[in-house]
Amino acid sequence: MQLARSLITVALAAAVAASAFAQDRPTLYKRLGGYDALAAVTDDFLGRLAPDPKLGRFFVGHSTDSIKRIRGGIVDFLCVATKGPCSYSGRDMKTAHTGLKITDEDWDISVKALTATLDKFSVPLAEKNEVLAAVAMLKNDIVER
Ligand code: HEM
C-alpha cells in the first residue's frame, strides 16, 4: 500500500514536471531559429527539388512570380505549423497538390531532400524528428493514389 502510494506520488510529480516542461519549452519555430531560418530551409529544400530529374517536372511552367508566391506560402505554412507568429492564407495542402499526381516515390525523394537540408543546417536530432514527423502527417493530403 505504502509502495503503491509512493509510486503514485512519483508518477504525479513526473506528470506535473513534464507538463511544466512542455509549457516552458520554446516552440519548434523558435528552436529552429525563427522566420529567417525557416526561409533558408525552404530555399535550400526547393533548391534540391527543382533540379531533381524526377521532381523537376513539378516546377516547370510557373512564372517567376508564381514561384515566389509558392515559396512564400511554404515559409508561412511552416511558420504556422511550427507555432510561429505567422498567418497562412494559401490553400490547404490537399487543394494545393491534388492533380499534380505526386507519387510515393516523389514523396520519398522529397523527404530525403528535406532531411539533407535539415542536416546541412545542423538542425539537432530532436527538432529534425519533429519537423519530419509534422511533414509525414501531410503525406495523405499531398500524395495521390
Ligand atoms: C513537404 C511537404 C510539403 C509542404 C509543406 C508543401 C507546401 C506547399 C504550399 C504551402 C504550397 C502553396 C499553396 C498555395 O499557395 O496555395 C505548395 C504548392 C505546391 N507544391 Fe507543395 N508542399 C509539400 C510537398 C510537395 C511535394 C513533395 C511536391 C512535389 C514534388 C510539391 C509541389 C508543389 C507544387 C508544384 C506547388 C504549386 C501548385 C500550384 O500552385 O500550381 N509540394 N506546397
Image: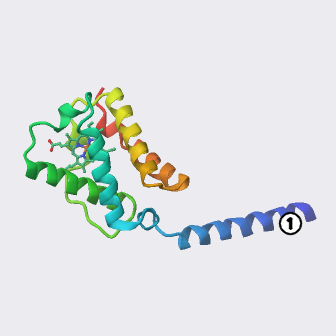
Q: Amino acid at mark 1?
A: Ser
* Residue at position x 30%, y 41% in the image: 48
Can residue 137 be seen? no
Q: Give above or below for 120 relative to 31.
A: above
Ligand 1 visible in quadrant: top left
Q: Position of residue 9 (x, y in %)?
A: 79, 68
**Residue 31 percent coordinates (x, y):** 47, 65
Q: Nearer the viewer, residue 11 or 52?
A: 52
Tell me the quarter of the image containing the N terminus. bottom right
Quickly name the residue at label 1.
6
Residue 23 in percent (x, y) is at 54, 71
Quadrant in the picture for residue 68:
bottom left
Q: Residue at x 39, y 64 (%)?
A: 83
Residue extending farthest to the right is 2
Q: Position of residue 78 (x, y in %)?
A: 33, 56
Q: Which of the two residues, 53 or 85, is positioned nearer the viewer here?
A: 53
**6 relative position to 118: left or right:** right
Q: Is residue 23 left or right of residue 60?
A: right
Q: How many marks?
A: 1
Q: Nearer the viewer, residue 118 or 107?
A: 118
The residue at 43%/68% (across/down) is 30
